[in-house]
Image: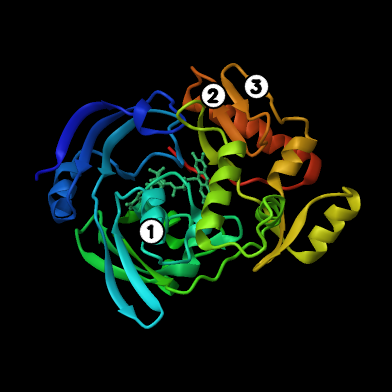
Amino acid sequence: MPPTIIENADLRRLNTFAVPARAARLVELDETAGASEALAACAGHGPMMVLGAGSNVLFTRDFEGSILRVRTCGRRIVSASGDEVVVEAQAGESWDGFVRWTLAGALFGLENLSLIPGCVGASPIQNIGAYGVEMCEFFDSLEAIDLDTGAQRRFDAPQCGFAYRDSVFKHGQAARWLILGVRFRLSRTARPRFDYAELRGELARSGVAHPSPDQIARCVVAIRSSKLPDPALLGNAGSFFKNPIVDLPRAKELIDRHPGMPNWPASQGIKLSAAWMIDRCGLKGAREGDAGVHDRHALVLVNHGSARGCDIWALAMRVRDAVHQRFGIVLEPEPTIV
Ligand SMILES: Cc1cc2nc3c(=O)[nH]c(=O)nc-3n(C[C@H](O)[C@H](O)[C@H](O)COP(=O)(O)OP(=O)(O)OC[C@H]3O[C@@H](n4cnc5c(N)ncnc54)[C@H](O)[C@@H]3O)c2cc1C
């Protein structure tokens, strides 16, 4: 099936902030085999950008080039050896649908990552994570095509450079890849992970001492549904800022100066809570026109209705400046800013 091409495309329904924006050209890829044709349809029409479900992107303006929207579907078991099963999903598969498919097949590992919006193809970009688990822990490899040359290549985990909400695909030349499909290494043996305080607490309240992966998934879904605004009702992209990671001396100094500051050990230092800092700056629930900071979750910026991307961005800069002034920390946005 040839890719669908739409000129002067409306992007409002293609981003979960639901901000108005247009793309000079939108090319929709429905079959992996059509990737080269889709790239050819984008070429020569200005800059190129890949879009999945638009749940981690903020359009602050129109895009004067081609957006390649990935809608390819398909998932399968690639190989099984003893306890370990390698599964693969095409980039346009819904992430949550894929997680549910793995659990229905009694393949375990991804249960803590239930209900994260977006597509499988975007999951390696920022190494999605939630409730004490990161995607990279179960990642096997991915297949990608170079947007400029059309050359296809497989990346293993070290080549992806995964870190906290980060990978090589977020930076420089490596951002020039269209991810076509991702493989994960899952287990037939359940190894439930519920060391994350909120998850542990919720399971304890439900009287579950030894949760199954399905119970963990249900608990994660319940927590997320009660805590995070549904983008279908209130435009947002989940956490707008990454939690900052600082070295130990800096963390000690900050904690001495701001007693009660939440902190956790992280692989590269000490992770601090961006939400706590934003709250301490008095910005939880702040609103400028229709751009707002969510009133129950300070890390989530929202569109109350008619905010434009530049309004959300202006509010984000106000939040960043306030946190910098009070804590000396520069918050880094998590979504892709266009
Ligand atoms: C309510 C809510 C809760 C969220 N909770 C979490 C959470 O708990 N943890 C978390 O990590 N994230 C979370 N997110 C962020 C988001 O769901 C993830 O980042 C998700 O992986 C984005 O997928 P997407 O398909 O929507 O990507 P998009 O928003 O379409 O794209 C994001 C970036 O990935 C690139 N990209 C997308 N697909 C491809 C591809 N096939 N090849 C190459 N590049 C590609 C885009 O160019 C862009 O730079 C949340 C978002 C929302 C709205």
Q: Quadrant of the C terminus?
A: top left
Q: Identify which residue, 107 or 49, lies in the foreground.
A: 107
Question: In the displayed structure, would residue 84 be above or below residue 149?
Answer: below
For label 2, the residue is: 311
Q: Quadrant of the N terminus?
A: top left
For label 3, the residue is: 287
Q: Is residue 96 visible?
A: yes
Q: Identify which residue, 338 or 126, lies in the foreground.
A: 126
Q: Is residue 161 visible?
A: no
Q: Which mark is residue 104?
A: 1
Q: Residue at x 61, y 60 (%)?
A: 132
Circle nearer the viewer, 3 or 1: 1
Q: Callout 2 environment at 10 Å: few (<14), some (14 to 19), or many (20+)?
A: some
At mark 1, the secondary structure is helix
- Residue 103: x %, y % from top left: 42, 60
**Three-letter amino acid code at the position of disc 1:** Ala
At mark 2, the secondary structure is helix
Q: CA distance from mark 3 to mark 1?
A: 42 Å
- Residue 313: x %, y % from top left: 55, 31
Q: Residue at x 17, y 47 (%)?
A: 38
Q: Is residue 240 rendered to the left or right of residue 278?
A: left
Q: Identify which residue, 143 or 296, lies in the foreground.
A: 296
Q: Residue at x 41, y 49 (%)?
A: 96
Sequence order check: which comes first, mark 3 or mark 1?
1
Sequence order check: which comes first, mark 2 or mark 1?
1
- Image quarter for residue 44? top left
**Three-letter amino acid code at the position of disc 3:** Arg
At mark 3, the secondary structure is strand
Circle nearer the viewer, 2 or 1: 1
- Image quarter for residue 199? bottom right
Question: In the displayed structure, would residue 42 be above or below residue 64?
Answer: below
